Image (cartoon, rainbow, N blue to C red):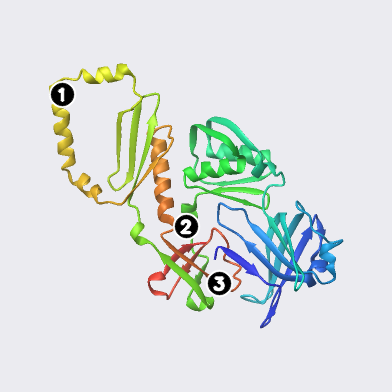
């Protein structure tokens, strides 16, 4: 259910017809009779939306005066009639840029692929190196969106950043990396840049309830990896100014520990060596007492995710640890399948599965 597919035609009173503009000109009537299929992929995050049009090429028109070119603007949508109620509804896919043109024979046909991205190709092409200081995820996304004439929709908490490096990366890759660090999702759609926290969307009310009969031809697949469920995450980072290595753990056995960095100065090492034998002994006793505590024994058998990250503070490390933990556990149970058109279901919505035993529950699309 990560992708939707619509085929132009009719079945049992149901009809779907293509609406399309190419470079601002209405091409629905011209292209309509040639359409074999329309495939629209609408991922919740990461990859841009994509559109594939498969067209008959009888008469060679699409190889001659109607030949599409890379970079052509395509606005597309489908008008559905007789699906899930009376009347019609329109699903607008947005604006795309043609990035692939494929022809084949027997029978002769054309497949035109297009991708949803800012009109300025520099977003995904031009690499930059820059140090962002005293900023935030919101501020970075806002500046990048403005740079390419896009609208920004930011639906997440404010996350402040002391410093972060954009090292020979496109703005697209860099912004995605920043979002990934804090388990935020990035979506590029219809000349919009959307940054959101999936946890907030997962809590929303389900827009539809599906049963086994909802899947066409009983076409569905369920995967479960509960054995890999993490109960804790430990982030390791080095504070070069304080010459300390930190380990910050969230979840079961939450803790923060700091030790002298391997790169600590000779002065710091010398100071450490001046500690009295008595004080060292007391420290050892304290550690021994801690190691025999219930909390420590509990974490010994807990499945923990260990990661190394660049962090500006303990608070920043905790945010990243929570993000990594949530992301690792997000895909523990997945369900995919083919259903009929449902105007309520779209990417970033939630659905409820009922009557399918252990598969029952709420799912994020």
Q: Position of residue 231 (x, y in %)?
A: 32, 52
Please indicate whether residue 154 sits to the left or right of residue 224 in the image. Answer: right
In contact (CB < 8 Å): disc 2 and disc 3? no
288 versus 251 height, above or below: above
Task: Give the camera-side residue of 213 and 262.
Answer: 262
313 versus 298 height, above or below: above
361 versus 14 height, above or below: above
Whole-number angstrom distance, CA of label 2 to CA of label 3: 21 Å
Q: Residue at x 66, y 45 (%)?
A: 151
Please indicate whether residue 282 sits to the left or right of residue 313 in the image. Answer: left
Instruction: Tell which circle, 3 or 1, labels the residue nearer the N-terminal end.
Output: 1
Instruction: Tell which circle, 1 or 2, labels the residue nearer the N-terminal end.
Output: 2
Instruction: Tell which circle, 2 or 3, labels the residue nearer the N-terminal end.
Output: 2
Location of residue 60 (image quadrant): bottom right
Count of numbered badges drawn on the protein: 3
Can you identify the residue that label 1 sits on? 279
Can you identify the residue that label 3 sits on? 338
Q: Residue at x 59, y 40 (%)?
A: 141
Quadrant of the drawing holding the N terminus: bottom right
Location of residue 296 (image quadrant): top left
Q: Identify the mark at residue 202; answer none if there is no mark.
A: 2
Please indicate whether residue 36 sits to the left or right of residue 307 in the image. Answer: right
Mark 3 Cα within 10 Å, few/some/many (few <14, many 20+)?
Answer: some
In contact (CB < 8 Å): disc 1 and disc 2? no
Mark 2 Cα within 10 Å, few/some/many (few <14, many 20+)?
Answer: some
Whole-number angstrom distance, CA of label 1 to CA of label 2: 51 Å
Q: Position of residue 148 (x, y in %)?
A: 68, 41
Task: Give the camera-side residue of 17 and 229.
Answer: 229
């Amino acid at each position: 259910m990560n992708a939707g597919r619509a085929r132009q035609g009719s079945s049992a009173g149901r009809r779907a017809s293509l609406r399309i503009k190419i470079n601002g000109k209405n091409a629905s009537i011209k292209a309509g009779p040639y359409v074999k299929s329309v495939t629209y992929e609408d991922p919740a995050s990461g990859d841009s939306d994509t559109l594939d049009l498969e067209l008959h090429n009888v008469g060679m028109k699409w190889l001659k005066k109607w030949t599409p070119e890379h970079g052509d603007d395509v606005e597309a949508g489908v008008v559905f009639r007789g699906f899930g109620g009376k009347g019609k509804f329109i699903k607008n896919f947005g604006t795309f840029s043609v990035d692939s043109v494929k022809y084949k024979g027997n029978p002769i046909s054309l497949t035109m692929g297009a991708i949803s991205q800012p009109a300025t190709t520099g977003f995904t092409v031009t690499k930059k190196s820059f140090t962002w200081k005293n900023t935030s995820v919101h501020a970075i996304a806002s500046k990048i969106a403005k740079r390419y004439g896009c609208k920004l929709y930011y639906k997440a908490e404010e996350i402040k950043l002391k410093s972060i490096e954009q090292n020979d990366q496109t703005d697209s890759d860099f912004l995605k990396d920043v979002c990934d660090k804090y388990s935020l999702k990035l979506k590029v759609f219809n000349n919009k840049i959307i940054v959101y926290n999936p946890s907030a969307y997962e809590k929303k009310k389900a827009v539809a309830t599906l049963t086994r009969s909802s899947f066409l031809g009983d076409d569905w697949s369920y995967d479960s990896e509960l054995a890999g469920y993490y109960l804790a995450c430990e982030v390791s980072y080095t504070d070069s100014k304080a010459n300390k290595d930190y380990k910050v753990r969230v979840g079961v056995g939450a803790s923060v520990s700091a030790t002298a960095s391997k790169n600590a100065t000779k002065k710091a090492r010398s100071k450490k060596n001046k500690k009295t034998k008595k004080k060292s002994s007391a420290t050892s006793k304290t550690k021994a007492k801690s190691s025999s505590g219930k909390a420590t024994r509990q974490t010994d058998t807990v499945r923990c995710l260990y990661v190394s990250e660049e962090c500006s503070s303990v608070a920043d490390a905790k945010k990243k640890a929570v993000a990594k933990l949530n992301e690792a556990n997000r895909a523990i149970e997945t369900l995919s399948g083919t259903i009929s058109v449902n105007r309520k279901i779209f990417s970033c919505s939630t659905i409820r599965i009922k009557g399918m035993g252990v598969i029952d529950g709420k799912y994020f699309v």
